[in-house]
């Protein structure tokens, strides 16, 4: 066993010496690459998409009796695009009946302006005026230099009993007992 280790060690030492003492191989010579001349033609691919577009879907079904708008034509809000049905179509007849009922209900609502409606309008106007006066008074109270201002902070704290709000007065005036006035 001792001889095998000695032979292996000797062979390893000879291999290392042979690798270190070998002459370097020839360095490869650089060859010049010919210059590539590009064509004058550029090829590109692309896709054109509109900045704004709309998908139109109708929530009803029926026979299209007329297409009112041509493709690419500009339309205004509220203008019909198509007409559905004709006199023999039952869906069309039902829709016409519903339209007439809705129109009658609207007309009844418009014509039912009686004393209750007038009183509701007066009450609404008074409430709006009172709200505006209160808002103006609030602005006065917040901005007048002679009126004492207090700032209160509510802070959420983690206590042994869970999260609880604490209120802190961060700025304001102290109240005296003698006069009861803020200073």
Image (cartoon, helix red, strand yellow):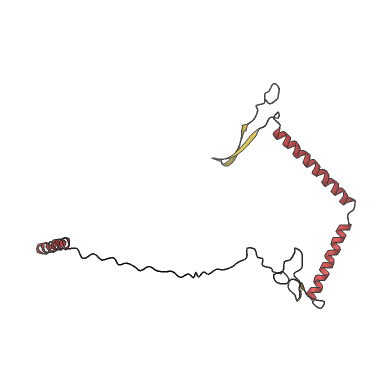
**Residue 159 % position (x, y):** 55, 39
Q: Residue at x 82, y 47 (%)?
A: 124
Residue at the farthest left position: 3
In the image, residue 10 sits, relative to residue 139, either above or below, namely below
> In the displayed structure, does residue 170 sit left or right of residue 147?
left
**Residue 91 % position (x, y):** 78, 74
**Residue 26 % position (x, y):** 21, 65
Q: Could you tell me how many numbered marks the image carries?
A: 0
Residue at the farthest right position: 115
> In the displayed structure, does residue 75 sit left or right of residue 47?
right
Q: Residue at x 78, y 39 (%)?
A: 133
**Residue 6 % position (x, y):** 11, 62
> In the displayed structure, does residue 175 sit left or right of residue 95?
left
Q: Which sits in the foreground, 117 or 46?
A: 46
Q: Residue at x 90, y 50 (%)?
A: 115
- Residue 50, by quadrant, is bottom right
Q: Residue at x 87, y 48 (%)?
A: 119
Residue at the farthest top position: 178
In the rendered image, which quarter contains the C terminus? Answer: top right
> In the displayed structure, does residue 130 sit left or right of residue 179?
right
Q: Which sits in the foreground, 129 or 67?
A: 67
Q: Which sits in the foreground, 21 or 166?
A: 21
In the rendered image, which quarter contains the N terminus? Answer: bottom left
């Amino acid at each position: 066993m001792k001889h095998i280790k000695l032979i292996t060690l000797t062979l390893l030492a000879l291999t290392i010496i042979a690798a270190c003492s070998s002459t370097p191989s020839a360095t490869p010579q650089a060859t010049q690459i010919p210059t590539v001349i590009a064509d004058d033609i550029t090829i590109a691919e692309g896709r054109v998409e509109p900045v704004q577009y709309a998908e139109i879907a109708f929530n009803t079904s029926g026979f299209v009796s007329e297409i009112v708008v041509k493709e690419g034509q500009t339309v205004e809000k509220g203008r019909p695009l198509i007409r559905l049905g004709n006199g023999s179509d039952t869906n069309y007849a039902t829709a016409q009946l519903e339209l007439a009922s809705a129109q009658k209900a609207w007309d009844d609502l418009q014509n039912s302006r009686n004393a209750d409606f007038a009183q509701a309008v007066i009450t609404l106007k008074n409430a709006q005026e009172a709200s505006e006066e209160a808002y103006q008074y609030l602005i006065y109270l917040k901005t007048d230099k002679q009126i004492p201002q207090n700032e209160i902070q509510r802070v959420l704290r983690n206590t042994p009993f869970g999260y609880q709000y604490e209120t802190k007065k961060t700025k304001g005036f102290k109240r005296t007992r003698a006069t009861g006035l803020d200073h």
